[in-house]
Amino acid sequence: WQAVFGNDSLEGQEAAWSDISLQFKILHQYTYDAEKQLNYHAWAAIPSDPNAFWANQSEPFKGCNPEFWGRSVGWYFAALTDVLEWMPANHPDRAILETNYRQVAAGLKRWQDPVSGAWYQLLQYDGSKKADGVGDLVGGKRYNIGTTANYLEASCSCMFTYAFFKGIRLGLLDKQTYLPVAEKAYAGLLTTFIKPKAGTTTIDIVQSCASAGLGPSNNPSRTGTVNYYLCGKDVGLAVNEGKAIGTFIMASLEKEEMVTNQSSLKVGSTAACTINVPSEGLYLVRAGMTDALTVKLRLHKGENTVYLPVSPQTNGRHTAVYTSHGLLLGQPSF
């Protein structure tokens, strides 16, 4: 929003984009562990601050909490995908952000669960990792006592799936390398987290972390440790948690766009149609009136030539073009 709609959004001005880039560069510089290929949940610039009691690592990760939380990396990976979609190609910081982006992608590929295709709450461990049963000692009191096991987590898995599909679509990630990751991940979302609700026609999204955070000083249980992320009083499992619902929808739309793009329509097509639209974006095109096929296409502003399948049952060679909000734009012939 800052770069596109802010005061500095005019063409040729770089201050907003430079500020946005700076936030991402600082985050990656201080939280990325090259050995583990993951980013720690958070970094405190002043780890001696009482509110940053959780920032207890030593160099080279001074100021970081000690664990890699799935959802925090999901926010980072998805946000960086969206930023690179809009960031000017000639901005001097774009290359470093793309490098960082691909480092994150490679790490998540490494830590994807090979069986389910999803990712764990604590990314560097599998389900055999458990809280230690002793808890965390803070200020003479113990918190986060329990033996809960690490688990496959819905919200981060949805965020990663979204970012992988979108990164491939935008040309930021190599399709041959990462499409199998994205496809396996989406299949994992459906089998691991999407569950029919008994006695209804609706579904639930299960196994989402309810919440997690670090500090402040008046909330000493939020330590950023294994014990906290698995047994903290605010990190229990939730059903239909908003951050899983929204990102599942986002991942599904990117998955759909991957398989219903313009090029896929050309296979076996028999007729071309010229479609004129007022602006670049996603449109719904209904081909034929009787034996109809509706597809979603990303069209450029102005005239677009698309190839549409027809059949003997098609009653008239006409199309109906709708905006993504369902507004009928026209009915060009083909």
Image (spheres, rainbow, N blue to C red):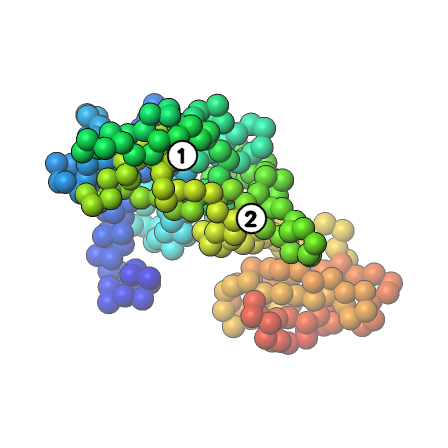
Instruction: Point out the image quarter for the C terminus.
Output: bottom right
Whether tag 1 and tag 2 are in contact, CB under 8 A, the answer is: no
Which residue: 19% across, 31% down? 140
Q: Is residue 158 visible?
A: yes
Task: Give whichever of 258, 27 is nearer the camera.
Answer: 27
Q: Kindly state the secondary structure of the residue where label 1 is placed.
A: helix
Residue 225 picture quarter: top left
Q: Is residue 174 left or right of residue 203?
A: left
Q: Which mark is residue 206?
A: none
Residue pictured at 56% horizontal, 67% vertical: 324
Residue labelled with disc 2:
205
Could you say which quadrant of the image residue 51 lies in? Answer: top left
Query: Looking at this view, is 185 or 220 the one in front?
Result: 220
Position of 85 relative to 36 (above/below)? below
Q: Quadrant of residue 331?
A: bottom right
Camera sees residue 111:
no
Query: Can you give x and y, in whole percent of width and height, for residue 301 in the image?
Result: 51, 67
Q: Position of residue 106 (x, y in %)?
A: 43, 31
Q: Where the N terminus falls, by quadrant?
A: bottom left
* Residue 260 versus residue 132 in the image, above or below: below
Front-most of 123 and 109?
A: 123
* Sequence-wise first label, 1 or 2: 2
Q: CA distance from mark 1 to mark 2?
A: 19 Å
Percent x, y for residue 13?
Answer: 24, 60
Q: Crowding at label 1, few (<14), some or many (≥20) Cα neighbours within 10 Å?
A: many
Label 2 crowd (10 A; few <14 / some 14-19 / many >=20): many
Question: Which label lies toward us, 1 or 2?
Answer: 1
Q: Amino acid at mark 2?
A: Ile
Q: Which mark is residue 230?
A: 1
Q: Amino acid at mark 1?
A: Leu
Q: Residue at x 64, y 51 (%)?
A: 197
Q: Residue at x 72, y 49 (%)?
A: 267
